[in-house]
Image (spheres, rainbow, N blue to C red):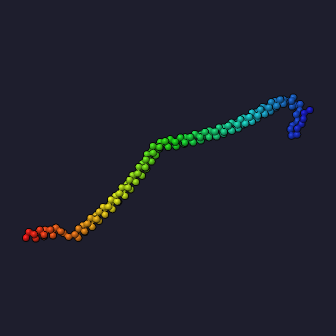
């Protein structure tokens, strides 16, 4: 006799005689459909997981490509700006040299101006001193005049 499990209907030989094979076939079909659906769900979940990992992998690759592109762009800009940067450094160096030369010229001009003031002062002193020297030419003309008479 068949084993009866509590909560389930007991199986009888009559069910087999009355076309229970159709029920079993439909039950089997349902079970097979359920198993197939479970397999599809597992495959879908697996595919979804694979897709997520693939998307993450693609995102990582895309991020790496963007980083590489940014790095290459920076290197290109640096290479293109190298000539301008070198020219700018030369310009700064030349400007610094020009500034030093102008300062040296300014210092020389200040010294020349000071020397000119000293010369001017000395000339004025000589002029004042010359006024103090008696005019000996008047004596020599007077002495010539007195000898002729």
Residue at 78%, 33% in the rendered image: 31
Q: How many marks?
A: 0
Q: What is the quadrant of residue 102 in the picture?
A: bottom left
Q: Quadrant of the C terminus?
A: bottom left
Q: Position of residue 45 (x, y in %)?
A: 70, 38
Residue at 84%, 30% in the rendered image: 20
Q: Position of residue 62 (x, y in %)?
A: 59, 40
Q: Position of residue 25 (x, y in %)?
A: 80, 30
In the image: residue 121, left or right of residue 18: left
In the rendered image, the vertical position of residue 64 relative to residue 137, given as above or below = above
Q: Position of residue 135 (x, y in %)?
A: 18, 69
Q: Nearer the viewer, residue 89 or 63?
A: 89
In the image: residue 21, left or right of residue 141: right
In the image: residue 100, left or right of residue 6: left
Q: What is the quadrant of residue 1 in the picture?
A: top right
Q: Nearer the viewer, residue 147 or 46?
A: 147
Residue at 88%, 40% in the rendered image: 6
In this view, which residue lies farthest toward the left?
Answer: 149
In the image: residue 78, left or right of residue 20: left
Q: Is residue 52 visible?
A: yes
In the rendered image, the vertical position of residue 142 relative to residue 71, given as above or below = below
Q: What is the quadrant of residue 70 in the picture?
A: top right
Residue at 66%, 39% in the rendered image: 53
Q: Nearer the viewer, residue 94 or 131?
A: 131
In this view, which residue lies farthest toward the front?
Answer: 147
Q: Is residue 37 visible?
A: no
């Amino acid at each position: 006799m068949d084993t009866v499990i509590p909560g389930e209907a007991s199986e009888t030989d009559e069910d087999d005689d009355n076309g229970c094979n159709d029920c079993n076939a439909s039950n089997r079909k349902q079970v097979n459909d359920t198993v197939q659906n479970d397999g599809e769900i597992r495959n879908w979940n697996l595919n979804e997981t694979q897709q997520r990992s693939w998307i993450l992998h693609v995102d990582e690759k895309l991020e790496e490509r963007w980083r590489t592109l940014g790095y290459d762009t920076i290197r290109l800009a640096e290479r293109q700006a190298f000539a301008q940067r070198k020219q700018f450094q030369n310009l700064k160096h030349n400007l610094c040299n020009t500034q030093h030369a102008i300062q040296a010229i300014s210092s020389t001009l200040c010294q020349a101006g000071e020397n000119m003031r000293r010369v001017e002062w000395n000339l004025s002193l000589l002029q004042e001193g010359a006024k103090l020297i008696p005019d000996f030419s008047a004596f020599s003309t007077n002495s010539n005049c007195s000898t002729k008479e």
